[in-house]
Image (spheres, rainbow, N blue to C red):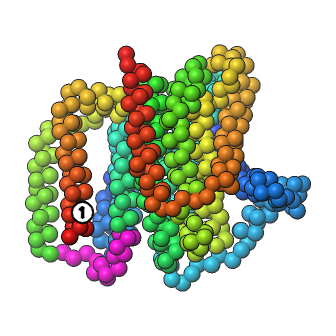
């Protein structure tokens, strides 16, 4: 075997391990962050018993979830009931493959881009797999074979379909500016120019709202809606299967936070740096870039939490009204405006 | 290697489609159909047609099947569950006629179409270029047709609910 091939395989494996573990550890610690921040917002203390400031709480929780009895109710459809939690996690991890997470590094005389798969159709790949994310919830609702999960599943499918369209329309303007669907091109264009949040404010607004809906976070958590549907689609789930839904939700949140960073917040760009400065710093520049990327994503995750404890949940008709009569025209108008500004 | 992969994903697509029509439960039919679309997308990837592959997953597996599932779950097709696959003579006849026509169509395409597409077909730019220059009239005609279908659906469902 030639060395290039072996090097490529090892480099890709390393990137996969680094990125997936970053996400899974973040997914594990996000509940802690969420509980702490909600405690500050509501003037409480939050978790503070296990470890310093409750920092070991996620580990204790994980062990609790794993060792709990795994109850499979008698009335469920066994195959889909077991399959659904897996379907809830897999799409988010797939999307990570096309997200660039730092400037390129030099290893053994070779340049390695910090993106697992640099696809020419980048953003379409993201939407393809984020559209598959709904199946975990829909099948879980159906397989549970009881009324509240079923309602949660039906709501989820309607909600995802509606907001996927807005999500897709909101980023068209960006790609008209970058003249490419590759996410790496979008980041590089922002590093040497202005961030898309300033050139595409309407697109940013629509994307963020649709991202909240796609990840089923408040104020769009109607599939779960504990005040009316008990716990929605995961009512019948317990133990590690419930944890999978939990992990899936937080992984999806990270994926969308990373997407916002890459598409609108300049990726790993800092205001006083350009691609030349990163290249001059060599591998330390890459490390700094990865840190900046994670920091921006984390800020957006905090925004998720902040919104959750600020806004009440929508009613279903309000949800549909917002999606089809407000966000969809806004997204279309954004494309038109971008087109007018970019006339040759 | 690529040839072997083609047979793996091709067989997967055929198997999933078979399970789609033989499954007793409509929800499982939908699940197998999603699998079938995914396998077809993999075949497109082997042909370097990344855009078509992604759109296959995005539109068919991701959007249209969600709508199917939504309807299946909403009207709760429990009665169908027991019956499974029913083969009426008419259905078999229709399938045979369709297969013959399809075979004839594939045969008439000639070797140029059956061979690998050139490298540019898979990229968004190349597809957009041909769609908005050479095929712009058919493209707009299809758009108008779809718009008419959507409007027709709205009008028909409205009339029924008012009556």
Instruction: Specify start and end residues of the magenta stretch as a single range.
Output: B72-87
x%, y% of residue B77?
A: 33, 76
Picture quadrant of residue A104 = top right
Q: Is residue B120 left or right of residue B153?
A: right
Q: Callout 1: helix, strand or loop?
A: helix
Q: Which chain is home to disc 1?
A: B
Q: Quadrant of the C terminus of chain A?
A: top left
Is residue B140 or residue A219 the one in the foreground? A219
Q: Quadrant of residue B33?
A: bottom left
Could you say which quadrant of the image residue B88 lies in?
bottom left
Is residue B75 shown in magenta? yes
Q: Is residue A343 positioned above or below A131 on the image?
A: above
Q: Residue at x 68, y 25 (%)?
A: A270
Answer yes or no: is residue B126 visible: yes
Q: Is residue A13 visible?
A: no
Give the camera-side residue of A94 and B5.
Answer: A94
In-front residue for pair A129/A35: A35
- Residue A55 image point, x, y percent: 83, 55
Does B162 lie within the magenta span? no
Residue picked out by circle 1: B157
Disc 1 packing (10 Å; few <14; some 14–19; many ≥20): few
> Residue A336, percent across and down?
38, 30
């Amino acid at each position: 075997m030639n060395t290039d091939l072996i090097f490529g395989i090892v480099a890709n494996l390393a990137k996969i391990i680094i990125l997936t573990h970053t996400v899974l550890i973040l997914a594990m610690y996000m509940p802690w962050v969420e509980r702490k921040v909600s405690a500050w917002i509501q003037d409480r203390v939050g978790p503070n018993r296990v470890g310093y400031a409750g920092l070991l709480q996620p580990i204790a929780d994980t062990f609790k979830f794993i060792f709990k009895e795994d109850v499979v109710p008698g009335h469920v459809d066994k195959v889909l009931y077991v399959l659904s939690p897996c379907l809830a996690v897999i799409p988010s991890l797939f999307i990570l493959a096309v997200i660039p997470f730092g400037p390129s590094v030099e290893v053994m005389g070779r340049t390695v881009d910090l993106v697992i798969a640099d696809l020419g159709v980048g953003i379409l790949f993201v939407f393809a797999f984020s559209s598959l994310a709904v199946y975990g919830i829909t099948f879980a609702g159906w397989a549970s074979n009881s009324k509240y999960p079923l309602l949660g599943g039906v709501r989820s499918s309607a909600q995802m379909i509606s907001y996927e369209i807005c999500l897709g329309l909101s980023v068209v303007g960006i790609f008209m500016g970058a003249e490419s669907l590759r996410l790496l091109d979008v980041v590089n264009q922002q590093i040497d120019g202005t961030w898309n949040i300033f050139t595409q404010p309407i697109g940013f607004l629509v994307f963020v709202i649709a991202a909240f809906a796609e990840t089923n976070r408040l104020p769009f958590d109607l599939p779960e809606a504990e005040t009316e549907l008990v716990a929605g689609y995961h009512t019948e789930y317990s133990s590690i299967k419930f944890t999978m839904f939990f992990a899936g939700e937080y992984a999806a949140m990270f994926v969308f936070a990373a997407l916002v960073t890459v598409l609108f917040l300049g990726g790993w760009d800092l205001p006083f740096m350009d691609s030349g400065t990163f290249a001059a710093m060599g591998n330390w520049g890459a490390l700094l870039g990865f840190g900046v990327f994670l920091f921006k994503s984390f800020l957006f995750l905090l925004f998720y939490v902040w919104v959750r404890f600020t806004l009440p949940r929508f009613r279903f008709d309000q949800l549909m009204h917002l999606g089809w009569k407000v966000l969809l025209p806004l997204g279309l108008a954004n494309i038109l405006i971008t087109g007018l500004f970019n006339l040759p | 290697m690529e040839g072997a992969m083609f047979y793996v994903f091709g067989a997967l697509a055929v198997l999933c489609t078979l399970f789609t029509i033989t499954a007793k439960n409509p929800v499982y039919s939908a699940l197998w159909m999603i699998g079938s679309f995914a396998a077809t997308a993999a075949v497109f990837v082997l042909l370097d047609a990344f855009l078509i592959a992604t759109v296959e997953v995005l539109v068919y597996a991701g959007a249209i099947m969600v709508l199917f599932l939504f309807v299946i779950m909403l009207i709760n097709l429990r009665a169908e569950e027991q019956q499974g696959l029913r083969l009426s003579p008419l259905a078999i006849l229709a399938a045979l006629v369709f297969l013959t026509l399809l075979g004839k169509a594939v045969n008439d395409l000639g070797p140029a179409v059956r061979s690998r597409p050139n490298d540019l077909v898979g990229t968004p730019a190349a597809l957009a270029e041909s769609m908005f220059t050479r095929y712009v009239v058919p493209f707009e005609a299809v758009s108008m047709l779809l718009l008419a279908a959507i409007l027709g659906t709205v009008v028909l469902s409205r009339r029924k609910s008012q009556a």
